[in-house]
Amino acid sequence: MSQAMGETHVKQTITVNGKRQPWSGQSVRALLVDAGIAPERGGVAVALNGAVVPRGEWDSTAVRPDDKIEIVHIVRGG
């Protein structure tokens, strides 16, 4: 047995736009920054477990293990 007795290493994950990724305990805003999306720009909407997260709550809304996040980024142009 390679692990010490009682020690477990379960990787916690979240799902972002249908893809599982490691959870790192960040806020919604930090998740956007990590994804390369500038939160201060317009055209971004976020849903957490099916509920829209208002832009004013991105800093205070924590992403937790097993959460499902959908990020919609509107690209403007012709």
Image (cartoon, grey):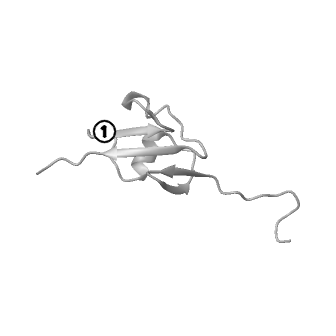
Q: Residue furthest left?
A: 78
Query: Can you give x and y, in whole percent of width and height, for residue 56 in the image?
Result: 39, 28
Identify whether 16 is placed above or below 39: below
Mark 1: amino acid: Glu
Residue 52 lies left or right of residue 42; in this view the side is right
Residue in view at x 43 percent, y 34 percent: 58
Residue in view at x 40 percent, y 53 percent: 35
State the SS at label 1: loop
Identify whether 5 is placed above or below 57: below
Q: Residue furthest right?
A: 5
Please give the count of numbered marks on the rendered protein: 1
Residue in view at x 47 percent, y 37 percent: 50
Residue 72 lies left or right of residue 11; in this view the side is left
Q: For mark 1, does the 10 Å Cα neighbourhood hold few (<14), some (14 to 19), or many (20 or more) residues?
A: few
Quarter of the image where the N terminus is located: bottom right
Query: Can you give x and y, in whole percent of width and height, for residue 6 in the image?
Result: 86, 57
Q: Quadrant of residue 30?
A: top left
Residue under pointer 1: 40
Query: Can you give x and y, in whole percent of width and height, for residue 73 in the image?
Result: 30, 46
Residue 17 lies left or right of residue 4; in this view the side is left
Q: Nearer the viewer, residue 55 or 45?
A: 45
Residue in view at x 40 percent, y 39 percent: 46
Query: Can you give x and y, in whole percent of width and height, for residue 78 in the image?
Result: 11, 51
